[in-house]
Amino acid sequence: MANHKSSIKRIRQTNARRLRNRYYAKTARNAVRVLRATEDKNEATTLYPKVCSMLDKLAKKHVIHKNKAGNLKSKLAKHVNSLA
């Protein structure tokens, strides 16, 4: 166990951040999964901006890499545009 007050606090902060990041990343993954499963063009076009916003926020906070966010957004845009 850590002996310094600062390292004890650091452990607390790290755990809190890790749990928060896991929650947001999991929520975004589920949103991506829902959008990919969508077959209705109207529903997909309303979901797409919300999912993109989620991915951008995660990339900004360094939860996921910015290139991963860009790749996911690109693939989702192709999916939405392919719906008829």
Image: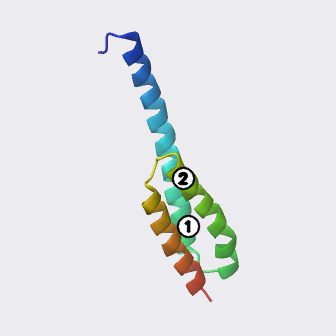
10 Å neighbourhood of mark 2: few (<14), some, or many (≥20)?
A: some
- Judging by the rendered image, the residue that carries numbered circle 1 is 34
Q: Which mark is residue 27?
A: 2
Residue sitting at x 65%, y 62%:
50
Judged left or right of residue 50, residue 25 is left
Residue sitting at x 57%, y 70%:
35
Are the two marked residues, 1 and 2, in contact with CB atoms closer than 8 angstroms? no
Judged left or right of residue 20, residue 8 is left
Q: Classify residue 67 by image quadrant.
A: bottom left
- For the N terminus, the image quarter is top left
Residue sitting at x 59%, y 63%:
52
Q: Secondary structure at mark 1?
A: helix
Number of numbered discs overlaid on the protein picture: 2
Tag 2: amino acid = Thr
Tag 1: amino acid = Val
Q: Position of residue 59 (x, y in %)?
A: 50, 53
